Image (tube, helix red, strand yellow):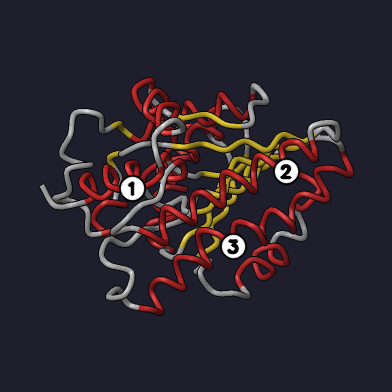
Amino acid sequence: MAIAVITGASTGIGREFAHICAGHGYDLVLVSRSAPALESVAAAVRENSGRNARVIALDLSAVDAPPRLSNALSDVAPDIEILINNAGFGLTGFFSELDTEKQMEMVQLNIGALTHLTRLFLPAMIARRKGYILNVASTAAFQPGPLMAVYFASKAYVVSFSEALHNEVRDKGVVVTTLCPGPTRTEFQDRAGMHASKLFSGPNVMDARPVAEIGFRAMKDGKSLVVAGRLNALTAFLTRFAPRQLAASIARKIAEQA
């Protein structure tokens, strides 16, 4: 029995990862805050694939949540082959005006929980010389993001951290992959207050399913990083050559309301 643990599994890209992993023969552990939403995903997985889906309702923005999750899975720890750190959220607005507590929750979820869970699950993967960790970042990782300063910075951390780990464990039978989606049709934009932004009103918005498929395939192929979508990949590449403040100005214009 091989198990995939997926955080942020109740909606969007995480929900699609659940169906993809189950379709490839994995039993699932689905994690997010909403038990009813998780149960709905688990029921659909069981019906469509026949795989087992275990639900753990947990707010990963709490500092003690990662060890609680690890302890809850101690009975199946040797069978966990995939960890997908998908949980995360963003907020739009001026850093000095956004709620402090919400911004710190974002840091804890996007950075703290992802780092802690990786540290908790990685040693067992190394010990058996088999495992995959897929960390979901964003194309936001490649430039500063005025009006979403903390979110962009948190995703830059995910890319740097994950690429370093990929190098550390590549000779130990473990793959660490970073998935960088661009704008994607999920609940993210509503929570971030971006439903009317230029970013999500443009023609380059992708559906969650192909984004998840790109990430899963890259992980299985042993890649360190993949950007979802050709135009997103081109934009991420070109951003490297733009002056940082020019890139910041462009990111700000895109984040502004349409």
Q: Position of residue 30 (x, y in %)?
A: 53, 52
Circle nearer the N terminus (3, 1): 3
Task: State which mark lies toward you, 1 or 2.
Answer: 1
Left or right of 21 in this view: 188: left
Residue 113's mark? 3
What type is the residue that disc 2 sits on? Leu
Quarter of the view holding residue 102: bottom left
Task: State which mark lies toward you, 3 or 1.
Answer: 1
Q: Residue at (61%, 30%) from the top-left corner?
A: 219
Residue 202's mark? none
- Contact (Cβ within 8 Å) of mark 3 with mark 2: no
- Contact (Cβ within 8 Å) of mark 3 with mark 1: no
Query: Residue 29 or 227: which is nearer the viewer?
Result: 227
Circle nearer the N terminus (1, 2): 2
Left or right of 31 in this view: 27: right
Residue 165's mark? 2
Left or right of 28 in this view: 209: left
Quarter of the view holding residue 204: top left
What type is the residue that disc 3 sits on? Ala
Secondary structure at numbered mark 1: helix
Q: Quadrant of the N terminus?
A: top right
Task: State which mark lies toward you, 3 or 2.
Answer: 2
Circle nearer the N terminus (3, 2): 3
Secondary structure at numbered mark 2: helix
Query: Residue 202 or 256: which is nearer the viewer?
Result: 256
Q: Residue at (40%, 50%) from the top-left corner?
A: 144
What type is the residue that disc 1 sits on? Ala
Marks 3 and 1 sit apart, C-alpha to C-alpha, by 27 Å
Mark 1, residue position: 248
Q: Residue at (31%, 39%) from the top-left corner?
A: 183
Q: Residue at (55%, 62%) from the top-left corner?
A: 56
